[in-house]
Amino acid sequence: MTFAGLVCTENLIRISRIYLHPRNRPPKRIGLSSFGHEGSACRLAQDQQTALKDWITARLPRSTRVIGAWIEKSFALSYSRPGLIALLHRLGFDYRKPREAPRNLNEEQ
């Protein structure tokens, strides 16, 4: 090995030591990054959303299947179940799966 090769190796070692020192490393990224995706726009027009709000308020449907079927029949649009729940939240409704109530409910309890 020549002297020039030895100098080159020492420079590489010195450069790698400088880069590996904690103060010279790039900062770590913690958490998720934003991908700039804010979701898609609503497929219902404003008047259709108003009609849906009025229908839900008047009928008080018990399942998302009924709401989805009405939207498909009225506006020829189909929503997935999670998409329909998100739509209901955007419209100000709080959808929750109904719980079963016992038949023999005691008023004292």
Image (cartoon, helix red, strand yellow):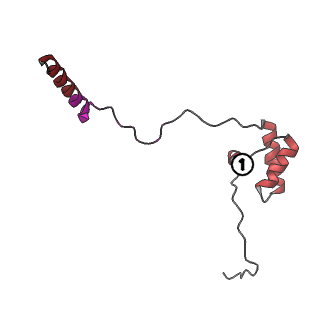
Q: Residue at x 87, y 45 (%)?
A: 73
Residue 28 on the magenta span: yes
Q: Nearer the viewer, residue 64 or 95?
A: 64
The residue under label 1 is 88
Q: Nearer the viewer, residue 87 or 23?
A: 23
Q: Nearer the viewer, residue 92 or 71?
A: 71
Q: Residue at x 82, y 45 (%)?
A: 71
In the displayed structure, would residue 2 be above or below residue 27? above
Residue 21 on the magenta span: yes
Q: Residue at x 70, y 55 (%)?
A: 95
Q: Nearer the viewer, residue 63 or 80?
A: 80
Q: Residue at x 40, y 41 (%)?
A: 30
Residue 89 as seen in the image, left or right of residue 48: left
Residue 87 as seen in the image, left or right of residue 8: right
Amino acid on which disc 1 is placed? Leu
Outermost residue to the right: 73
In the displayed structure, would residue 37 be above or below residue 12? below
Outermost residue to the left: 3
In the displayed structure, would residue 102 be above or below residue 23? below
The percent position of residue 35, horizontal first and vertical second, equals 53, 34
Span highlighted in magenta in the image: 16-33
The percent position of residue 103, horizontal first and vertical second, equals 76, 78
Residue 96 as seen in the image, left or right of residue 28: right
Q: Image quadrant of residue 36? A: top right
Determine crowd level at label 1: few under 14, some 14-19, many 20+ residues with C-alpha closer than 10 A. Answer: some
Q: Quadrant of the C terminus?
A: bottom right
